[in-house]
Amino acid sequence: MPHSNDTTPSLLHEAGQQSHQSEFFNPVPDGYVRGRHKYLVVLGTVMSGLGKGIFSSSLTKLLKDKGLTIAPLKMEGYLNIDSGTLNPYRHGEVFVLDDGMETDMDLGTYERLLDQNLTRDNYTTSGQIYRRVLDKERHGGYLGRDVQMIPHVTGEVKMMVRQLAMKQNADLVCIEVGGTVGDHENAFYIEAMRQLAFEEGPGSVAFVALTYVIEPPALGEQKSKAAQLGLKKLMEAGIQPHIVAVRCQSPVEASAREKIAMFSNVPLNRVFSMHDRESVYTIPEDLRKTGMDREVLSLLDLHGRVNQVHEDEERERWRKFVADIKRKRAHKVTIGLTGKYASLRDAYASIDKAIEHAAARLHAQVNIEWIDTTKLTPEQVPDRLASMDAVIVPGGFGVRGTEAKIACVRHCRETGLPYLGICLGFQMAVIDYARYVCNINGASSTEFDPQAPHPVIDILPEQKKIEGLGGNMRLGGKDVLIKPDTLAAHLFGNPAKPATEPFTIRQRFRHRFEVDPRHIETLEASGLVFSGRHPEHPIMQILELPPDKHPFFIGAQFHPELTSRPLRPQPMFMGLMAAAIQHANPEAEPEPTRDRWLAQCETPQNTQVPA
């Protein structure tokens, strides 16, 4: 049997085919050139949730800054086709890509750090892999062979990885395998990555192991034995790591790093301390200081593809952002986040990051109050929000906690407290306005009350036909038509050139219910402004109150947090942050005006982020 270096193109069969003369099963797409694409594989040990996505996205950010084209890929072991039905308490938020794919929160980390839109090709689950294999089997794609985990399921993984590399013309595909080594559901992924390294040959695949050093308070020292055993498990699977990232509460001591290096056969300079930091956004620079980016270039022979000028420019931009993160903040504000998953911050991870991006730009120190609306009565709302400088009502599904959310909206509207409603928060604002301004008794949503006498929020048959919704949600990037001379126009437009004509932006949606068009005229006649709409149909996307009625009150049917980036904060969060600063410091501006804080919303993020 030939060595991997001697594998010839004649042995590289098309997907789903295997020669009777060879046991090699190395499926490649048409036109694939071995050596053109390199692979970085990140695997976890000891336990999950240590930050594989943060480490891999930070490292690949450095490589992208050098001018390389990066294609992340997250592999999940569960059988769900996507993350849309997963419980936020178990998996955190559902992150929606522009093409509508519902993924886990790690894809959001990649999009933010790399500042690029990802697609469904950048995410897979065991369910997707098995479905592809079974579909091929039903169509005779395996030429009568008995279909097995090895080589066919592992072959499908390799095929998918190579297709991604070609489709996105990637210099480097960064593959993150969810869970940990030893999880039964991830075994075929790990075996596929071992095979990939064998078939691609030396200098084509680099492995990163993320492990954990324990610091028991009772012992007062760092213990690396669990990390050593986890790395041993990885090597038993046939994978020799090239880099080890070590999670720990405090910086990993030299003795622990030395033990890990010795027992994993990894040079000490490639054992990185990934300890807790003030911000995850400082990790890329720390990786650069240790030379980890250059180590990857050497391991994968990528030095020749580096654009030094581009790297210097990007490094300076990032340095300024990190300096903003670290600097002493001029303003202190408190923002209330009212949701039914408030006990788990990961359920609102993108909102948390969007707030952080805006706060860094406007030099604000933010205290987020996580308010569980399932434990809050409408009568308790005024006291609970008394210390807030702004309120966010985020997205969600189901009836639990909705009356408290409506009470939060009403309190913000009546007291002038800056307000941002997201998805469900948009719908709550409509219900509040219908009930207490338009005096529509019984105004509600059919999601909460199918027999509501006045369903101002509903699923409309004509909208199903328009959007092709069927029984599913409206998902992914959609165009929103912005009305000129509105708050939305100021936020999303060019401050130097006030919009006199409507323009469109692109935002990401994840919802089923809409504003019933039969109530739009009544709502608008009473002063509510729908400043963002569907470009062709009577579907409302953004609402707001005019400046003579409220300093900052806006809601979006879409999820603005999904497109916020560290260097390009999302406009609605920038506006909310500026309004919160003004609310916290009213004496700083004797006659506060909307234009005053709008001027702070520099470099607005417009229609689309880079592909």
Image (cartoon, rainbow, N blue to C red):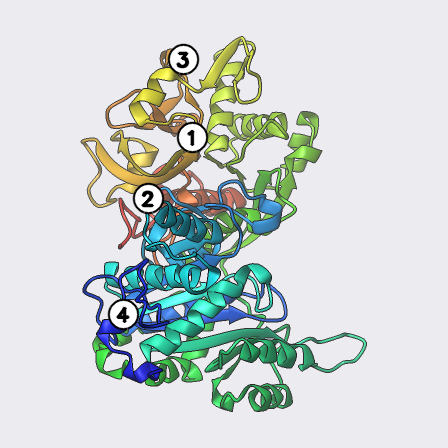
Sequence-wise, the earlier of marks 2 and 1 is: 2
Q: Secondary structure at mark 3?
A: helix
| Contact check, label 1 and label 4, Cβ < 8 Å | no
Local packing at callout 3 (Cα closer than 10 Å; few below 14, some 14-19, many 20+) is: some
Real-space Cα separation, disc 2 to disc 1, in angstroms: 15 Å
Sequence-wise, the earlier of marks 3 and 4 is: 4
Sequence-wise, the earlier of marks 1 and 4 is: 4
Amino acid beneath label 2: Asp
Q: Which mark is residue 99?
A: 2
460 and 192: which is toward the camera: 192
> Where does label 4 land, which residue?
12
38 and 109: which is toward the camera: 38
Q: Secondary structure at mark 4?
A: loop
Q: Quadrant of residue 156?
A: bottom left
- In the image, residue 599 above or below residue 293: above
Real-space Cα separation, disc 2 to disc 4, in angstroms: 32 Å
Sequence-wise, the earlier of marks 3 and 1 is: 1
| Contact check, label 3 and label 1, Cβ < 8 Å | no
Is 29 on the left or on the right of 435, as rendered?
A: left
Q: Which mark is residue 472?
A: 1
| Contact check, label 2 and label 4, Cβ < 8 Å | no
Q: Which mark is residue 519?
A: 3
